[in-house]
């Protein structure tokens, strides 16, 4: 990893928590699709093991919703509720995580922040928000549909992420 990437990761980690809180609370309503599906990531063996540990540590409920995993079944994916909050572990680093505009707070669709000791990159998407862990040895992505309380989801997931995915820089 070059020093440019490392410097921006550090900046990303420290920037804009109030903006994240504001964007988390700005949720509207959308139509629900009762079927949950998620593409299964293909991480290396070390990250896959961390993800299996995360799967064992995940809570039965997130945001008050029971777990009902997406198709295809995998220890690298999990889901709660309908419309589903989808977690995928072992995803690649999102390009916006090293985008200088995000680190400088100049990207209206991506904000860095932290929730209960876990750093996240939040990216606004057409159907909700995507959160990806930062400063962890594996990238964990959480997709929260529009109209679902993303702050509750991140609060509920933080203890499992901290327990299973060590702090550090993902390779």
Image (cartoon, rainbow, N blue to C red):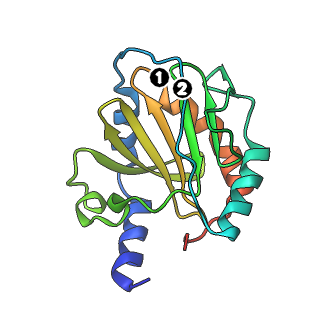
Q: Which residue is mark 1?
A: 148
Task: Identify the residue at horizontal 32%, vertical 39% (top origin).
Answer: 124
In x, y percent, where is residue 22? 35, 34
| Residue placed most toward the observer, 34 or 22 | 34
Please, which residue is most extreme toward the bottom here? 2
In x, y percent, where is residue 18? 37, 42
Q: Are marks 1 and 2 in contact (CB under 8 Å)?
A: no
Please tell me in which quadrant of the rendered image residue 87 appears: top right
> Local crowd at mark 2 within 10 Å, few (<14), some, or many (≥20)?
many
In x, y percent, where is residue 23? 34, 35
Closer to the N terminus: mark 1 or mark 2?
Answer: 2
Q: What quarter of the picture does the C terminus occupy? A: bottom right
In x, y percent, where is residue 17? 40, 47
Task: Identify the residue at horizontal 46%, vertical 18% (top origin).
Answer: 33
Secondary structure beneath label 1:
loop
Please tell me in which quadrant of the rendered image residue 32 appears: top left
Secondary structure beneath label 2:
loop
Q: Which residue is mark 2?
A: 84
Marks counted in the figure total 2
The answer to whether residue 79 is left or right of residue 148 is: right
Task: Identify the residue at horizontal 64%, vertical 38% (top origin).
Answer: 78
Residue 128, numbered label = none
Rendered position, 147 above or below 49: above
Task: Identify the residue at horizontal 38%, vertical 84% (top origin).
Answer: 3
Foreground: disc 1 or disc 2: 2
| Residue placed most toward the observer, 30 or 39 | 39
Distance, label 1 to label 2, CA atoms, is 9 Å
The answer to whether residue 158 is left or right of residue 3 is: right
Please, which residue is most extreme toward the right here? 56
């Amino acid at each position: 990893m070059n020093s440019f990437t490392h410097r921006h990761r550090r900046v990303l980690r420290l920037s804009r928590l109030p903006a994240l809180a504001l964007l988390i609370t700005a949720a509207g309503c959308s139509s629900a699709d009762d079927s949950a599906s998620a593409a299964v990531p293909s991480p290396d063996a070390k990250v896959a093991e961390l993800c299996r540990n995360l799967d064992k540590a995940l809570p039965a409920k997130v945001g008050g919703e029971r777990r009902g995993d997406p198709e295809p079944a995998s220890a690298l994916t999990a889901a709660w509720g309908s419309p589903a909050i989808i977690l995928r572990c072992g995803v690649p680093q999102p390009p916006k995580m090293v985008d200088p505009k995000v680190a400088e707070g100049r990207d209206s669709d991506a904000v860095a922040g932290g929730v209960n000791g876990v750093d996240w990159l939040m990216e606004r998407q057409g159907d909700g928000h995507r959160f990806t862990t930062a400063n962890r040895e594996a990238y964990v992505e959480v997709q929260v549909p529009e109209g679902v309380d993303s702050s509750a989801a991140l609060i509920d997931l933080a203890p499992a992420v901290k327990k299973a995915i060590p702090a550090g820089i993902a390779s």
